[in-house]
Image (tube, rainbow, N blue to C red):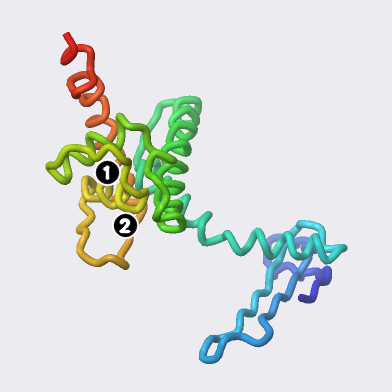
Amino acid sequence: MRATTVTLKAPYRSDRKLKPTTVNAILAEEIDAPEGDVPVSWLLLTNMPISTEAEIELVIAYYCIRWMIEIFFRTLKSGTRLEKRRFETIERFERYLAVSMIVAWRTFYTTKIGRELPDISCDAVFTEDEWQPVYKLVTNEDPPSKPPTLQRMVRLIARLGGYVDRVREDEPGTDTVMRGMERMHDISACWRIFGPNSKMVSN
């Protein structure tokens, strides 16, 4: 890792003079990369402090999660169709944005943890009213007494959103998971009202 402060000259403009910009620059290069792989070489520009090794490592750590941030915003924009909404006031848009960010976060979180911790129980993420009706609808079988794995449940939910569960290594993405979770909420509401444990059935 190497870091320094640099001043970037402003581009020429015929109608005005722009001021130069001072930023902190970090050069992070991979040493002893695996054979056949291209060594990582990142040149990062930031306004965060770089006076200590810990501060430099923090900037690099932030950049390491950049792709996850990109996926989150793609989920927010495409999944909730945020950019297609037309509101009369900014206040309405802000309220919609706040709710959409929660929806996008849960979708992204569910998809990611389903890949990283596939063998944990699905009740770590879903309630019985969520996973049981989805299991019943998709598999046409009664829900098991023991909750299925999280990977299994994410795949079942994604199938509601158009995911074709044929290749084991091909995990569903956030788009199909979000569409599946939208249907899951409706199915879950019906399950609570008309399912085997509902008051209507009990009476």
Label 2 near label 1: C-beta < 8 Å? Answer: yes
Residue type of the residue flagged with mark 1: Gly
- Residue under the point 51% across and 57% down: 68
Q: Between residues 81 and 118, which one lies in front from this camera angle?
A: 118
Residue at image mark 2:
172
- Residue at image position (21%, 24%) is 190
- Rendering coords of residue 200 (x, y %): 18, 12
The vertical placement of 65 against 38, above or below, is: above
Q: Amino acid at mark 2?
A: Pro
Disc 1: which residue:
180
Q: Front-most of 125 and 38?
A: 125
> Which residue is situated farthest in the top direction here?
203
Give the CA distance from mark 1 to mark 2.
11 Å
- Is tag 1's residue or tag 2's residue first in the polypeptide sequence? 2
Q: Position of residue 90 (x, y in %)?
A: 49, 29
Q: Callout 2 environment at 10 Å: few (<14), some (14 to 19), or many (20+)?
A: many
128 vs 98, left or right, is left
Residue appearing at x 35%, y 46% in the figure: 79
Residue at far front of view = 145
Which quadrant would residue 28 be assigned to in this image?
Answer: bottom right
Rendered image quadrant of residue 143: top left
How many numbered dots are placed on residues in this image? Answer: 2
| 23 in relation to 135, above or below | below
The residue under the point 20% across, 58% down is 164
